[in-house]
Image (tube, rainbow, N blue to C red):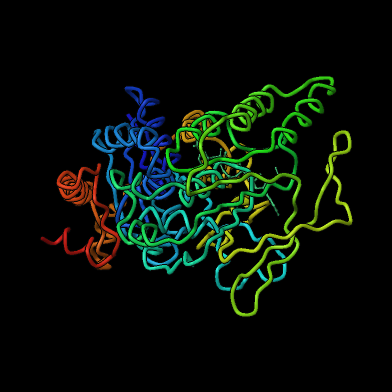
Amino acid sequence: MNSFRIAIVGAGPAGYFAAQALQNLQTDDKKFAIDMFEKLPTPWGLVRSGVAPDHPKIKSVSKVFEKIATSENFRLFANVQLGRDIQLAELTDSYDAVVLAVGASKGKKLGIPGEELVGSVSAADFVPWYNGHPDFADLKMQLATDTAVVIGAGNVAMDVARMLALNPDELDPTDTAMPALEALHNSQIRTVQLCARRGPEHVAFTSPELRELPKLEHTTVLISELEISRAIERLETLPEPDSDAKNNLLAMLAIAQEKKPQQDRTLEFHFLLTPKEIRGADRVEEVVFTVNEVHGDSVVATDETYSIKCGLVISAIGYETDLSVELDIDKGRIKNQDGLIKDNLYVVGWAKRGPSGVIGTNKSDSTEVMKLLAEKLVKAKDPVDFKEVLDAREINYFSQQDWEKINQTEVEAGENLGKPRLKIVSHEEFLEVKNA
Ligand code: NAP
């Protein structure tokens, strides 16, 4: 019987689903002992620091993660950073295989003038801020403005726009990080302008997310019925109209036709606007867009521009892998062939395929890569116990038991406030709870 030792770097959905796949692939002759390394003191990746707090059902997948983590031969070493506390080469030397599940945490840049002005922020900062990621919790967001512009037409742009446009009372019973919740309560933003560079038929939103917008109690959602009707006409002239696009258009048409009394908060959708410049003396004052048109299959720029006055711009235009180790990056992800990087090094999740798909997408994706990994393993290496390595280096790692203590502390603190949990948002407090 061979017992193979596998290191998984990154405790997000792709990492857990890789661990689960390995657990399921075990046979009487082939066992897997898994060590999962995570740079934060807490696991769950985007389920903790990405999923919007008003989408608690999506977070219930954490129960699956905890089942995986409490299975035999699984160890968590959180608060351990690759490239700082441990090196990739020592992992590949010590383990039979290493799986990088490091995600894609760097926001893509617009690459336009004014992007660096105060008040211009990436969703890659804004989302972890409201979710209590300890590296972002202290950010000062520019919320003392009437209008915010959100650039992008994917589900992250939708989350960001919704979080800014809803009445923060709706977030009180959620696990929104307290510093962000307080700031949102004091926010002066009353209008959120979401701007897509292509037509309504091209948006990357998914229709369930669109269909929940009318449920916002205190926000009027504005979409031009004329623009949606034109997009439906355009879609119907195509030889093979995309069914997702059709579902999206029907969801947007329902919003456009909704008769709801004007609320004091507005979320407005704009289409066919490519950001050209962010203007302002020392902070954001205006975003200027090039107006586009749809010609057949393509979207083309016109000579016209359109401008929106605002004090906050959030770009939600996709992510790239942010690596602390030297590996080849191609189009924002680690260069790989079906998940194999080289030798005994693999990659799963957003770091493998780019920032696409929902959390569940990682299950099938990680499973395929782990099948490849398991097939290639023949003889186990001599074991090296990385716990001893970390202890010798006096690295203050958080074990599964430490995490369970933090989890319980957060959940208990939340109970009194009618929240699923009260998130700890500072590295110091994580250590205090661990050492208590
Ligand atoms: P995404 O779905 O790829 O959307 C990116 C958006 O940014 C697209 O609309 C894209 O427009 C636009 N864009 C890219 N470059 C741009 C530029 N230079 N200027 C203006 N717009 C630009 O990415 P995402 O929203 O970051 O989401 C990532 C993944 O997470 C997606 O699979 C998403 O569904 C998933 N997610 C799911 C949920 C949920 O299930 N509730 C929530 C959040 C995220 P073009 O199409 O024109 O390129």
Q: Is residue 333 above or below residue 203?
A: below
Q: Residue at x 54, y 47 (%)?
A: 266
Relative depth, front residue between 83 and 223 = 223
**x, y percent for residue 178:** 30, 57
Q: Residue at x 75, y 26 (%)?
A: 232
Relative depth, front residue between 233 and 296 = 233
> How many labels were placed on the picture?
0
Q: Residue at x 72, y 24 (%)?
A: 242
**Would you say residue 271 is visible in this rendering?**
yes
**x, y percent for residue 331:** 68, 51
Can you say which quadrant of the picture contains the C terminus? bottom left
Can you say which quadrant of the picture contains the N terminus? top left
Relative depth, front residue between 91 and 136 = 136
Q: Is residue 432 left or right of residue 188?
A: left
**x, y percent for residue 369:** 52, 34
Picture quarter with ligand 1? top right
Q: Is residue 219 above or below residue 385?
A: above
Q: Residue furthest bottom?
A: 282
Q: Residue at x 51, y 37 (%)?
A: 261
Q: Is residue 363 left or right of residue 271?
A: left
Q: Residue furthest left?
A: 436
**Would you say residue 369 is visible in this rendering?**
no
**x, y percent for residue 264:** 48, 49
